[in-house]
Image (tube, rainbow, N blue to C red):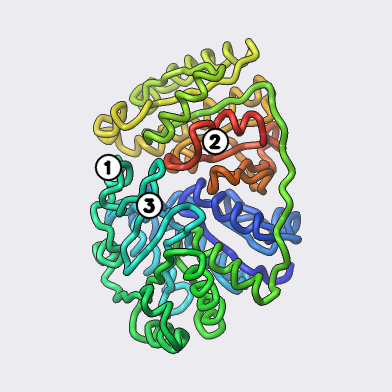
Amino acid sequence: MQNPLLSYYGDDLTGSTDVMEALETGGVPTVLFMRQPDQHLLARFSHCCALGLAGTSRSETPDWMEDNLATAFEWLKSLGAAVCHYKVCSTFDSSPTVGNIGRAIEIGRRIFGEASVPLVVGAPQLKRYTAFGNLFAAFRGEYFRIDRHPVMSRHPVTPMNEADLLVHLSRQTSLSSGLIDLATLEGGDLSTGVDRALRDWDIVLFDVADRATQRLVGEQLWRVREHNPGFVVGSSGVEYALLSAWAAKGVVSGTSKPVSAGPVDRLAVVSGSVSPTTEKQIGFALAHGFDGIPLDALQLVSESSGGAIERAVAAGRASLAAGRSVILYTALGPQADRGAEIERVDGARNALGRALGTILRQLIVEQKLRRAVIAGGDTSSHALGQLSIDALTMRMPLPQSPGSPLCLAHGGGEIDGLEIALKGGQVGTDAYFETIRLGN
């Protein structure tokens, strides 16, 4: 295999497929591995120009990161990619104790060299923007500073109470940080300013407020990788920025032409999301022929979880056997979140994801399903692990819901060839689940 253009570690599964979608639609063949592949598995995807490793660090502790991220980064470094990307959510939600982005950067610098790390979070394609270091995000057609965002400011695990990303990051690391702001991007002699910033600070955040500034940032990321270790942190805005630079320089040519996956008669969805976006999507699906099965999250993480899983499978089986699509969900919106109760059980949030994955696998195998969905960023990472899949490639992008493509599963025994979508809580139109069922 020739050295890839890009390698990346996704801090959760939905974010990992978000990167894959950006790259694939930009004409860069990409594979996402569920775990570090052996040489045989790696050889199966030797045609890919970008390689990803799906992780769970968004929902993990700093101690977990110390034990796991270094090994992942060492493997990614061994691939010899021009750029290695630690992918974080475009809402940057994190804290000193959960999903600590600062700690991940510290570990990355130890592996890739004690050099400055570029940070890119803005992604206009996802309606995320950074201006003078502050993050803004859309919600239902309106735009909010992230600390006033109706959802992210109230995230059940990592609420965003600070919009200035470098202030937010300073609570997670003692590394120095600086900003390439909009005025610098639009001024003269940008390269000199960027080089100075990379010499002066350990972390350099680049503003991205529109496609024009994104293009400028992409040019700089691609330029500085020649004298920097190539380790970059940020959202899929990193890929969107690089794609503009690659296209301009002829590194990649054109974009891929997606082919509709077509409809399936039945679709199974498991959801651990408490987002109001997912709530509306479930409501839309129930109004369009899906069966809804509420699940008790506490029962699924209790000592008697086996019985709760069996009952959920039985209910899902009845709907699917009758020819109907089904959604099994633990909450309908933030008002139904039982996070405070769940947190009393050690490791419960990760266990909840695993329980939902166990339910989904049984339904897929028993009912011979061709397509499925997991909703919830943290849920997806732990749920998909129960399907024993080796890798994912993109089956079909969803232009109306960027960041949540339909993927094709490789490996997993009876799961091999499954089409599956991993949907973050904030992602997608109201018709998302029905769109996935229709495959268009």
Which of 37/25 is in front? 25
Which quadrant of the structure image shows residue 361? top right
Label located before the other in sequence (1 or 3): 3
Q: Which residue is mark 3?
A: 137
Q: CA distance from mark 2 to mark 3?
A: 32 Å
Q: Amino acid at mark 2?
A: Gln
Q: Which residue is mark 1?
A: 154
Q: Which residue is mark 2?
A: 386
Q: Contact, CB < 8 Å: mark 1 with mark 2?
A: no
Q: Tell me if I can see residue 56 in this picture.
A: yes
Which of 81/246 is in front? 246
Label located before the other in sequence (2 or 3): 3
Q: CA distance from mark 1 to mark 2?
A: 29 Å
Identify whether 57 is placed above or below 333: below
Q: Amino acid at mark 3?
A: Ala
Q: Amino acid at mark 1?
A: Arg
